[in-house]
Amino acid sequence: MPDNCLFCKIIRGEIPASKLYEDDEVLAFRDIAPQAPVHFLVIPKKHLSGPSAVSIEDEQLVGKLMRIGSEIAAKEGVPHFRVVFNNGSQAGQTVFHLHMHILGGRHMAWPPG
């Protein structure tokens, strides 16, 4: 794991997070700047810089992110939610460690703006 990656530091316990789920492969925690009443992130513990870095060997792990995110959303009482992966700075990615946003608890307009 890169020493300077914010999410790797959270995984290592160097930075606190409001954890919702953790196992050997995945960590989920609340976003520190929520954009909806429910907003959390689901990340792999394996450092991948973003969606474009996902390889064939990572397909099962990325599927697990989706499953865990859906399970947490249900536990949070949010049956309808938006899933967002940003890829690159022009798409809004600010932390270059693969992460899935789950946003819910309010109406989501389209396009997102």
Image (spheres, rainbow, N blue to C red):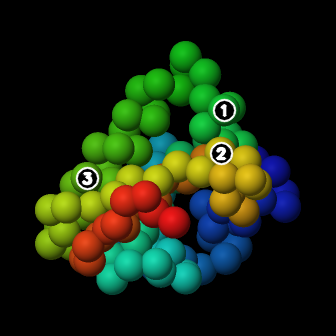
Query: In percent of the image, x 70 and y 73: which residue is there?
Result: 14
Horizontal side of 102 relative to 99 (left or right) equals: left
Dots 3 and 1: beta carbons under 8 Å?
Answer: no
Among numbered discs 3 and 1, the one appearing first in the sequence: 1
- The disc placed on residue 52 is 1
Whether pointer 2 and pointer 1 mark residues with C-beta atoms closer than 8 Å, the reply is yes
Instruction: Characterize the local packing of mark 1: few (<14), some (14-19) or many (20 or more) Cα atoms within 10 angstroms.
Output: few
- Which amino acid type corresponds to the residue marked 1 in the rendered image? Ser
* Disc 2 secondary structure class: loop
Q: As rendered, which of 30 and 27 lies closer to the eye? A: 30
Q: Left or right: 69 with respect to 54?
A: left
Q: Are marks 3 and 2 in contact (CB under 8 Å)?
A: no
Q: Is residue 64 above or below residue 82?
A: above
Q: CA distance from mark 2 to mark 1?
A: 7 Å
Q: Is residue 96 above or below residue 17?
A: above
Q: Is residue 24 visible?
A: no
What residue is drawn where x is 15% and y is 72%? 77
- Res 87 label: 2
Q: Is residue 102 left or right of residue 89?
A: left
Q: Position of residue 29 (x, y in %)?
A: 45, 69
Q: Mark 2 packing: few (<14 Cα in 10 Å), some, or many (20+)?
A: many
Residue designated by label 3: 70
Q: Disc 3 marks which amino acid?
A: Ser
Mark 2 vs mark 1: which is more N-terminal? 1
Crowdedness near tag 3: few (<14), some (14–19) or many (≥20) residues, C-alpha within 10 Å: some
